[in-house]
Amino acid sequence: MRRERTPIVIAGKSQFTEAEYLEFENNSIEKHEFYQGKIFSMNEDEYRKVEDPEAAYHKRFMTEEEYLAFEDASEQKHEYFQGEVFAMAGAGDQHNEIFSNLFILIGSLLKGKPCRPYGSDKRLKIPQNSLYTYPDISIYCKTNSPFDSSAKVSQDPTVVIEILSESTKDYDRGRKFKLYREIPTLKEYILVDSELVGVEIFRLNSGNHWELEEYKSIDQSLLITSLNIAIPLREIYENTNLI
């Protein structure tokens, strides 16, 4: 069986400058080597079978079944949209600090309530537009049925929270929010900036329109109306260099 060392391919591109490699590496959760314009993963054997799941990533399009099989065998998370697979950027220390603060605070405030927060390992599917993704935090509320902890894919969040970074903020504010709006159960979409103090929350009003409320002061509290909880921004940004 033929074995070869296979370089990373991003958006059909396999040749990179040093500056492009450094930008890619800073946003990756894995380590990579750079040699003569090509990027190679260090989280696998130097040589591998060409049939390994990574090879499937170079296909132009995948079925949902192919994507799920590929994703289950991958150490890195990928989004899937209309047949295409996209690697998700890694998170920096500030992003992770904000996530930890929010996840702990929300979990504490929801204790005893029929809602539960999940982190970025919780895969979300939106059947209306075929998107599979991993929100930073998603909150699910079950009133008539128990939580299924064995489910590989979930579809009905009440709240979705994304923590913005330089590489993802335009996507999270734009196209991704447009796709999220097709989730029938979604009531609030929250964007938390990791580069400055600021939170944007989009709420679905009684007229079925999305309204924006912004929080820019460290002394304010974020109100999540669908959950009936409030979180001080000072606690969201605790242990970051922003306060």
Image (cartoon, grey):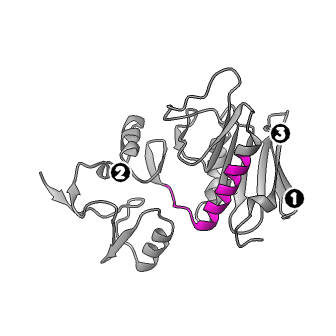
Secondary structure mostly seen in the magenta stretch: helix
Q: Is residue 107 left or right of residue 40?
A: right
Q: Quadrant of residue 96?
A: bottom right
10 Å crowding of disc 1: few (<14), some (14-19), many (20+): few
Secondary structure under badge 2? loop
The residue indicated by pointer 3 is 228
Instruction: Estimate the spatial distance between the alpha carbons at disc 3 and disc 2, rounded to whole Å.
Output: 42 Å
The residue indicated by pointer 1 is 220
For the residue pair 5 and 243, the one nearer the viewer reads as 243
Q: Is residue 146 magenta?
A: no
Q: Is residue 61 left or right of residue 141?
A: left
The magenta segment: 88-106
In the image, what residue type sits under mark 3?
Asn
Give how far across and how far down residue 84 sits, in percent: 44, 47
Q: Quadrant of residue 217?
A: bottom right
Q: Name the residue rendered at 63%, 32% in the picture.
A: 156
Secondary structure under badge 1? loop
